[in-house]
Each structure stands twice: as structure tokens, then as C-alpha cells.
């Protein structure tokens, strides 16, 4: 039942974050700091997704209000490149959620993200990570421009291969 309260709290906080412009700078900083800290400590997977959605929503609205939040991308990158499999999968999952929620805001980082995705799909060490990469691509493609097109085209054969492996598993 505690998990339900946590999920509900995340939902309410997401509503607050959607009105990002009405929040003070200190409220914004406190929210951003607290939700990342909560994500570090939360073990319940059912609660982690709403927390990640909250982080993605906060990221999206912070960028819309011209307030950068580079720590969140550094945090995700640290997880994605981690040698610990659980952290790696968590990072790719988080990036997938971020792309679903804030694909347009993450667009300046597409080239780097596509390079990371290419490595994940080329190695195919973890099919769960590959699935999250494919999910991310689905969200990114509508916002992809000619700047990222070459990287995306190079990635497509690996994405098809990963899709086949996921289907066969």
C-alpha cells in the first residue's frame, strides 16, 4: 500500500511540474534534487517508473522554461555506460522514458544518443536494453532531422537485427 502512495505522490508532483513556470527557482532546484535522490534509493520497480516519468516531465518543462538540467543527462549517461548490468538496463530504460516524454527537448543530444544506441544494438549483450533502445527510437524518429539522419540510417540494420533476436527469444 505504501507503493500506491508513492505512485500517487509522483502523479501529483508531475502535475505541479507541468506548471513549471509558476514554481520558484528554489522549488525547482529542490524538486530536481529530491526526485533524483529518491530514484537512487527506490527499490520497487512499480514506483521507479513513475519517478522516471516525473524526472522526464521535470526535464521537459525545465528546458521549455529555458532552465538547463545537465545533471540528469550526466546521471543517465553514467548508468548507461555502467559495467553493472542492472544499472546499465536502468539507464537505458530511463533514457527510453525520457525520449517518450521529452524527445523534442532531447533533440540536441540525438547524435550522442544514437551513437550509444548503436553500440548497444551492435553488442546485443542484453535484449532488455535493446528493447528499450527500439522504444526510444520510435519516440525519436518524428523529431529526427538531416543532422542526425546519417547516424540513424547506420543504426537501422542493427535495429532490425535486434528486433529479430527479441522476437525469437
Image (cartoon, rainbow, N blue to C red):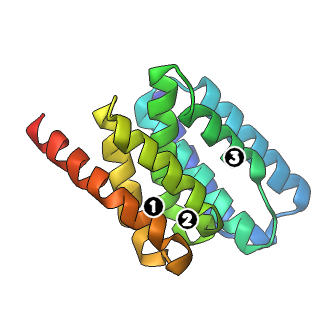
Q: How far is mark 1 from mark 2, CA to CA? A: 6 Å
Q: Residue at x 52, y 26 (%)?
A: 87
Q: Is the residue 152 above or below the residue 89 in the image?
A: below
Outermost residue on the top side: it is 84
- In the image: residue 40, left or right of residue 95: right
- Mark 1 sits on what residue? 100
Q: Residues within 10 Å of mark 2 (few under 14, many from 20)?
A: many
Residue 151 in view:
yes
Task: Specify whether 45 is left or right of 34.
Answer: left
- Which residue of the protein is positioned furthest toward the left in this rendering? 168
Q: Nearer the viewer, residue 76 or 58?
A: 76
Residue sitting at 88 percent across and 62 percent down? 24
Q: Is residue 148 left or right of residue 73?
A: left
Residue 105: x, y in percent?
A: 62, 69
What element does badge 2 sit on? Answer: helix
Ranked by sequence position, the earlier of labels 3 and 2 is 3
Q: Name the residue rendered at 70%, 32% in the picture.
A: 37
| Mark 3 crowdedness (10 Å alpha carbons): few <14, some 14-19, many ≥20 | some
Rendering coords of residue 48 (x, y %) = 49, 36
Q: Position of residue 43 (x, y in %)?
A: 50, 23
Indicate whether 99 appears above or below 71: below
Q: Secondary structure at mark 3?
A: helix
Q: Which residue is mark 2?
A: 102
Count of labels in the image: 3
Quarter of image, res 12 = bottom right
Q: Secondary structure at mark 1?
A: helix
Which residue corresponds to mark 3?
Answer: 72
Amino acid at each position: 500500500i505504501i507503493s500506491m502512495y508513492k505512485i500517487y505522490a509522483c502523479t501529483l508532483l508531475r502535475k505541479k511540474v507541468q506548471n513549471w513556470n509558476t514554481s520558484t527557482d528554489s522549488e525547482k532546484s529542490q524538486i530536481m534534487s529530491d526526485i533524483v535522490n529518491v530514484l537512487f534509493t527506490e527499490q520497487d520497480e512499480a514506483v521507479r517508473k513513475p519517478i522516471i516519468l516525473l524526472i522526464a516531465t521535470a526535464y521537459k518543462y525545465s528546458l521549455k522554461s529555458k532552465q538547463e538540467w545537465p545533471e540528469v543527462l550526466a546521471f543517465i549517461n553514467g548508468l548507461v555506460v555502467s559495467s553493472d548490468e542492472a544499472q546499465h538496463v536502468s539507464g537505458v530504460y530511463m533514457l527510453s522514458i525520457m525520449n517518450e516524454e521529452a524527445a523534442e527537448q532531447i533533440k540536441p543530444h540525438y547524435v550522442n544518443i544514437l551513437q550509444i544506441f548503436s553500440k548497444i544494438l551492435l553488442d546485443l549483450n542484453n535484449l532488455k536494453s535493446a528493447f528499450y533502445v527500439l522504444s526510444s527510437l520510435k519516440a525519436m524518429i518524428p523529431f529526427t532531422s538531416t543532422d542526425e539522419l546519417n547516424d540513424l540510417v547506420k543504426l537501422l540494420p542493427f535495429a532490425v537485427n535486434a528486433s529479430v533476436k527479441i522476437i525469437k527469444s
